Image: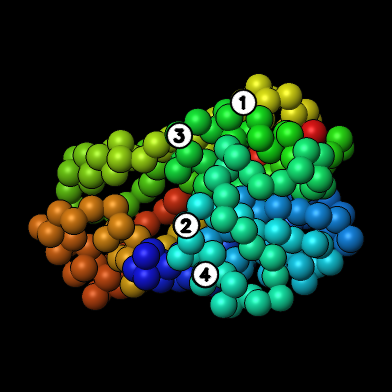
């Protein structure tokens, strides 16, 4: 878990990711005094940032180690163990629902969004962020191998293409007025190399990328789909 946490921390520290998180908070609407749940909260950074903006923010994650890290980092915030398809929340109890880099890890994204609709009060807003694991762009001298490795990684995930379906998933769950944005994250240096080590253990291919990182030539671009809709 520590290596994953290191990668997530490095990605979250990128200025464009801070801007993307801020945009997701804007799309939730007014936050002051409202209850917002962050599903798949990880180490809890978004929960803390939502609280700074005046929300009563609740973080939920399936990984007890992530919850432990979140509670250690943000002791004033509220975190609970829970699954996206079975949230430990009362019906209609929240005004905002946020899921960032979460639905690709869920076996049934449609069920997760039915659960999102259940916990949201009428007029509440859902905001989804995520990368499509088939559309990661990596500069390499071996493009065919790169495509194979990306698709092989995608095939290990429960729902690797959930992000391209965010809009339709929300509409199918009964949400309205969807807003769709695409933001591309560019990674270089050790941050990019750390992500690639999460994608494959092919040492020959990674050797090229390691050399690219050493000479400041590594390049990874990740389109992130941001979709918001109303309950």
Q: On screen, 213 above or below 122?
A: below
From the image, tell me which residue sits under label 4: 68
Secondary structure, mark 2, is loop
Q: Distance between the residues labelled 4 and 3?
A: 24 Å
Disc 1 vs disc 4: which is toward the camera?
Answer: 4
Task: Tell me which label, 3 or 1, sits earlier in the chain.
Answer: 3
Using the image, determine if residue 93 lies above or below residue 7.
above
Spatial CA span between label 3 and label 1? 17 Å
Q: Is residue 98 left or right of residue 101?
A: right
The colour scheme applied to this rendered structure is rainbow
Kindly identify which residue carries mark 2.
63
Disc 4: CA contacts within 10 A as few (<14), some (14-19) or many (>=20): some
Which percent across, then down, holds residue 163?
A: 52, 38
The residue that label 3 is drawn on is 107
Q: Please state the horizontal and vertical placement of residue 177, each as a whole percent of the image.
A: 78, 31
Q: Residue 79 location in percent, x, y?
A: 64, 63
Q: Name the residue under label 1.
A: 168
């Amino acid at each position: 878990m520590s290596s994953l946490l290191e990668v997530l921390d490095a990605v979250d520290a990128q200025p464009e990711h801070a801007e993307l998180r801020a945009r997701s908070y804007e799309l939730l609407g007014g936050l002051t005094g409202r209850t917002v749940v962050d599903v798949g909260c990880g180490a809890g950074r978004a929960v803390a940032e939502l609280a700074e903006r005046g929300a009563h923010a609740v973080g939920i994650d399936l990984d007890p180690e992530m919850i432990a890290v979140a509670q250690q980092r943000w002791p004033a915030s509220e975190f609970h163990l829970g699954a996206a398809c079975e949230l430990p929340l009362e019906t209609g109890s929240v005004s905002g629902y946020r899921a960032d880099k979460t639905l690709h890890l869920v076996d049934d994204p449609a069920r997760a969004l039915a659960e999102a609709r259940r916990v949201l009060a009428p007029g509440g807003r859902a905001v989804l962020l995520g990368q499509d694991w088939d559309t990661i762009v990596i500069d390499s001298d071996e493009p065919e191998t790169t495509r194979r490795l990306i698709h092989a990684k995608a095939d290990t995930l429960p729902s690797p293409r959930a992000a391209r379906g965010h809009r339709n998933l929300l509409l199918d769950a009964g949400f309205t007025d969807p807003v769709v944005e695409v933001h591309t994250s560019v990674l270089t240096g050790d941050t990019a190399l750390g992500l690639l080590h999460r994608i494959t253990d092919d040492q020959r291919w990674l050797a090229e990328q390691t050399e690219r990182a050493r000479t400041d030539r590594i390049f990874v671009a990740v389109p992130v789909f941001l979709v918001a809709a109303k309950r």
